Image (cartoon, coloured by chain):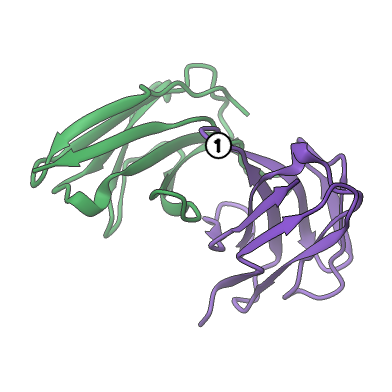
């Protein structure tokens, strides 16, 4: 099993550009999450989903959008990139409540 | 979610047990205690979780005090590969099982 796969691993964006961070899991997990981690800080929840067609905001949703059309995929869209969105983005999935998360290896994004 | 407090850093000799403390004095009855670790800049890795009882798996043991106000993660025989940031999280499992990560404890395992 591949687990949680994130693409790309690295990306440099110019201010105002847009991009989609891809996240796919092959474990048939219902719950999926997007976190960002700034240097020396803990992870902050951006968006999460408890199933296909259901998404909800986390702690820091501004500047991002998500969709969950299938159980496997949970893409994160950045519109009008800003330097404040420079961060490492982690996608995670979980079978459900009271289960541990499986994280992807992250996407390192720099906005210049 | 209840606030958790962890020491910012700890050292441990290789081969010895690493005991990582966590205070969660305001935890409510339906909040679980979760432990994750993050090695360098990799994605965090789930270690263990528990509600009231002590738990053990192939990676670690989790000891929760009877009043549930604190817990200890025990790595029985720490190796250099256990050097990582360890996060203790108290979380209500409803509402999407969302986890709030703090800054954790940087554990350094040395020879």
Residue B95 visible to the viewer = no
Q: Quadrant of residue A18?
A: bottom right
Identify the colour of chain A in the image.
purple
Please count the marks in the image.
Answer: 1
- Residue at 66% over, 68% down: A8
- Residue at 55% over, 36% down: A39
- Percent of width and height locating residue A48: 76, 52
Q: Find disc 1 in the rendering and name its residue.
A: A39
Whether residue A95 is situated above or below residue A58 in the rendered picture: below
Determine whether, in the image, residue A92 is placed left or right of residue B82: right
- Residue at 54% over, 74% down: A3
Mark 1: few/some/many CA within 10 Å (<14, 14-19, 20+)? few
Determine whether, in the image, residue B103 is placed left or right of residue B73: right
Whether residue B76 is situated above or below residue A93 in the rendered picture: above
- Percent of width and height locating residue B111: 8, 43
Q: Quadrant of residue B70?
A: top left
Whether residue A84 is situated above or below residue A79 in the rendered picture: above
Which chain appears green? B
Return the residue nearer the eye: A59 or B83.
B83
- Percent of width and height locating residue A70: 81, 76
What is the chain letter for disc 1? Answer: A
């Amino acid at each position: 099993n591949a687990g949680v796969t994130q693409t790309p691993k690295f990306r440099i964006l110019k201010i105002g550009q847009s991009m989609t961070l891809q996240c796919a899991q092959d474990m048939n997990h219902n719950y999926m999450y997007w976190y960002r981690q700034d240097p020396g800080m803990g992870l902050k929840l951006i968006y999460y989903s408890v199933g296909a067609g259901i998404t909800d905001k986390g702690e820091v949703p501004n500047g991002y959008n998500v969709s969950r059309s299938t159980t496997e995929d949970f893409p994160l869209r950045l519109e009008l990139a800003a330097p404040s969105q420079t961060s490492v983005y982690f996608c995670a999935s979980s079978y459900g409540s009271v289960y541990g998360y499986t994280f992807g290896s992250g996407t390192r994004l720099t906005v210049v | 979610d209840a606030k958790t407090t962890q020491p910012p850093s700890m050292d441990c000799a290789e081969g010895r047990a690493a005991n990582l403390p966590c205070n969660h004095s305001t935890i409510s009855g339906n909040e679980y205690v979760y432990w994750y670790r993050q090695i360098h800049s990799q994605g965090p890795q789930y270690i263990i979780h528990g509600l009231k009882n002590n738990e053990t798996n192939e990676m670690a043991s989790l000891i929760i005090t009877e009043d549930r106000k604190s817990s200890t993660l025990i790595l029985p025989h720490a190796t250099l590969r256990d050097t990582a940031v360890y996060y203790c999280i108290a979380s209500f499992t409803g509402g999407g099982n969302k986890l709030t990560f703090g800054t954790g404890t940087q554990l350094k395992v040395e020879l």
